[in-house]
Amino acid sequence: MGFSAGKRKSRDEQDYTVTLASTAFPMDDLSDDVLERVLSWLPTSSFLRMTSVCKRWKSTKTSKSFNLACSQVPLRDPWFFMITDDSKSSTFVYDSTENSWKNLNHNRNRRDFIPVASSGGLLCFRCSVSGGFLLCNPITGSSRDLPSPISDDNSKPLQAVAMTALTPSSYKLVTISGEAPNLCFRFYESDSGSWSKELNLVKKNDGDEYNDDNDSGTVYFLSKTGHVVVASNNLQRSPSKQYSSVITVKDNAETVYFLSSHGTIIACDLTNRCFTELPKLLPPFLEYSIDLVECNGTMFVILLSEFYESASLRIWKLENQSWVHVGMLPPAMSHELYGREGDINCVAGADDKILVCFNTSPPEVYCRYFVYDLVAEQWSELPKCFKDGDAVEFVSALSFQPRIEATV
C-alpha cells in the first residue's frame, strides 16, 4: 500500500533531503524508540517517502511502538478523499500539507460501495445492495466489513450515517432512519463489535416556531422570466451526499445534524434521545444549494444562492437559536458561479479548513474547489487534478487524517 504523488519531487531534491537528514542529523545513531518518536512526527507523505531510505526505517511501519508514538500526535493536516460524479470513490486525495494531489495505489475497488462518512484516519463505505458497511484506512489499505443493522421496520428509510473516531483503534458508527417526527437511530461500536438496538428519538418541544413544514399553504412566486412557480419543499441531494451528516460532541452530548428531504436541518441529540428542527436560513421560494460541516465541535452551514443577478456563497453557524454569519466567498469569485445552476458539497478538515466542491451537471460540466480557513478568514482555490493529461472532476469529498496507526 502506498501512493504516487501527482507532483513528484525531482531526483536531486529527494537525494538532497536524504543526504541532509543523514549528515546534519545522525539518525542511524538513535535507538529504535527515539527514532520511532522522531519519525512519528513527520508528515505522512514525508514518512512514506523516507521509508525507502533503508530497511530499518521501513520496518517501523509495522512496529507497535511506532503506531503508539503516532497515536500520540494530536492532529495531522487533513487529506481530502475525492468522489466522482457517479458517486464512486476515486483514487485521488488532496494532501493539504504539501498542497498537492496524490493517487492512492490501493486495490479496494469494491463494486456497489459508496463513500458515506469519515472520521480520524478511517473512511466508511455503504453497500447500496446489502446495506452493509465497509471501514478502511486509505493509507494502509486495511479494511473491515460490518454487517447491516437489522431494522425492526424495513419501511423506515435511512436518512443519515455519521461516524466518530473515539481513539485510533476504536470508532462509533451511527445511522438515523425514519421520517420526522418518527425518527430512530442505531449505533455500532468497534469495541463491542455489534449494533445497538433501535432507539427512538422524540421531538423536542420548542414551541414549533422553527418548523414550517406543517404549513399546508402553497407558496407561489414569480420567476425571473415572469412565470408563476410553485415553491417546492423537496431537497434535491447529490447521490454522493445522500446520507451525509455531521456529528458534534459538546458537554458530553452527541448531536447528529442532517438535512431532511424538505431541506430542514434536523439536530438529533443522541444522549437525550430527542431531536429538533432548526430555523431555516432562506424562504422556500428561493433556489439554493446547502450543505453542513463540522469543525472543532461546531456545526456550520454553507449556502449558495442567487439574488439580483449575482451568486453568493456564505458560511453560517448557529448561536442561541440564531444564525450568525461567519464568512463569504469574495464577490469576484462567487460571481463566476452565477447562472450555472450548480450544486455545492462540502467537508471540513481537522485544521479549521472547509472544502467547498462546486459542480454542474452535464452537458456543461464545471467544477471548482474552494477552501476557507476559519482562523485566517481567507479563501483559496485548489488546482485542477490531472490524470494522463486530462482533468479529473470531482463532486464531493471526505476528510480524513492520514494516520498509519488507525485500525479497523
Image (cartoon, grey):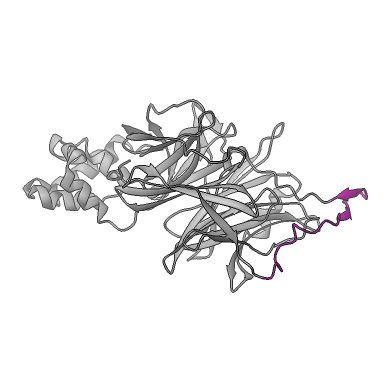
Classify 111 as above or below 82.
above
Q: Position of residue 75 (x, y in %)?
A: 34, 57
- Front in this rendered view, residue 234 or 390: 234
Q: Position of residue 248 (x, y in %)?
A: 47, 60
Extreme residue in the bottom direction = 320
Q: Position of residue 29 (x, y in %)?
A: 6, 48
Q: Position of residue 175 (x, y in %)?
A: 50, 46
**Which quadrant does the N terminus fall into?**
top left
The residue at 74%/57% (across/down) is: 213
In the picture, measured across the screen, residue 391 lies left or right of residue 56, that is right
The residue at 22%/47% (across/down) is: 67
Q: Quadrant of residue 394?
A: top right
- Front in this rendered view, residue 231 or 342: 231
Extreme residue in the front direction = 152
One can see residue 205 in this view: yes
Classify 370 as above or below 378.
above
- Front in this rendered view, residue 406 or 254: 254
Magenta region? 207-230
**Which quadrant does the C terminus fall into?**
top left
In the picture, measured across the screen, residue 250 lies left or right of residue 26, that is right
Q: Main secondary structure of the magenta part?
A: loop
One can see residue 353 in this view: no
